[in-house]
Amino acid sequence: MLKIAIDVMGADNGVAPIVEGVIQALKTRDFHAIIVGDEKQIAPLIPSSVANRVEIVHCADYIKMEESASSANKRSETSIYKAVELVKNGEADAVVSPGHSGATMSLATLKIGRIKGVSRPAICTTMPNTTDKPSIILDAGANTDCKPEYLVDFAIMGYEYAKNVVNLENPRVGLLSNGEEDNKGNELTKATFKLLQKFPFFKGNVEGRDIFNGSVDVIVCDGFSGNLVLKASEGVASAISSVLKKEIKSCICSMFGALFLRGVFKRLKKKMDHSEYGGAPLLGVQKVVIISHGSSNARAIECAIYQALHAIESDICVKLTNAFANKPQDEN
């Protein structure tokens, strides 16, 4: 039975919604949950129906959001340190954390280790688009300052993730720029473009709008740009939802119309809700690591666990290891 370590400390809304998400996942999927955190808060929330598949690793300390990620490696009694150690030592197959993302990335890289040939691990996040499959963006925040060779590695990892986890037969990879023309972009994207031209999956430069129209499957960028895109998109989705609700409530005719379109709105909400995507895998490390939003609700954690299980079952870390073992030497 697969074992998932879940760090329940440090999230914006406390322990309860994180544990609730674990419980919902346990009711749906067969796995063993190792919950790392304050046992006094966790134990009363575990129902007897799933208690035989839950182990609690007590830990009251955690890395607070305002603390520096660099301190994580020195704090061996924190929840994320213990959760990552479980994976490092083979006592868990993956780790899920909605806590300090910088600490999670730092510890995963230092303790679990990078896949040979990977210059920098990257956060891989999914975004809704007009097709049935989501768009994949990386890096979404792990590396704010990048070199061209980093982005090449992101492209390879994104391609393999899209192919093996999202199950796209021939994923198309684009480079985020300020125009589709080959000569557009800054010094980083221009240099990266030349390197990516050697790969058959590369389709050229793409603009921000292409993230949502499905013209490519994987969008590669530096972590600074990727994080801006991610946060801006979340803001736009939230604003559209608020405007729709306000407009519907402003008119009786609109309210009646909304009743007829209730199913459409429900499907739209599910597609746009970041909770349905769970979390973002940290690609490039030797085991599965899922970084969830600090404001994650129970549904988001539930989906993050499904994401971890699917990543393990698809052997994505093995696939990435093989991909980088076969990477041309002049691209390292």
Image (cartoon, rainbow, N blue to C red):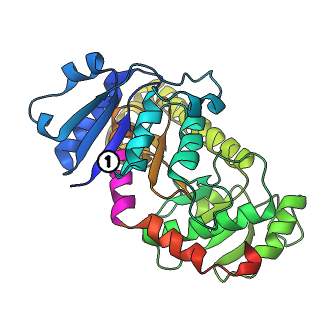
Q: Nearer the viewer, residue 276 or 95?
A: 95
User: In the image, is 313 to the left or to the right of 173?
Assistant: left
Residue named by callout 1:
91
**Magenta stretch: dominant secondary structure:** helix
Q: Secondary structure at mark 1?
A: loop
Please tell me which residue is depicted at 17% across the width and 41% down the height of the picture.
53
Name the residue type under label 1.
Answer: Glu
Please tell me which residue is depicted at 60% across the width and 65% down the height of the picture.
218
Q: Is residue 57 above or below residue 331?
A: above
Q: Nearer the viewer, residue 212 or 185?
A: 185
Picture coordinates of residue 222, whole percent (x, y): 73, 53
Picture coordinates of residue 288, whole percent (x, y): 44, 54
| Mark 1, other Cα within 10 Å: few <14 / some 14–19 / many ≥20 | some
Q: Nearer the viewer, residue 113 or 3?
A: 113
Asked if residue 186 is among those painted magenta in the image, a careful observer would answer no
Can you see residue 134?
Answer: yes
Asked if residue 312 is among those painted magenta in the image, a careful observer would answer yes
Q: Which residues are magenta?
A: 304-313
Q: Is residue 228 above or below residue 209?
A: above
Can you see residue 166?
Answer: no
The image quadrant where one finds the C terminus is bottom right
Picture coordinates of residue 255, whole percent (x, y): 39, 31
Picture coordinates of residue 165, whole percent (x, y): 43, 65
* Count of residue discs: 1
Residue with the most extreme left position: 49
Please tell me which residue is depicted at 37% across the width and 43% down the height of the picture.
86
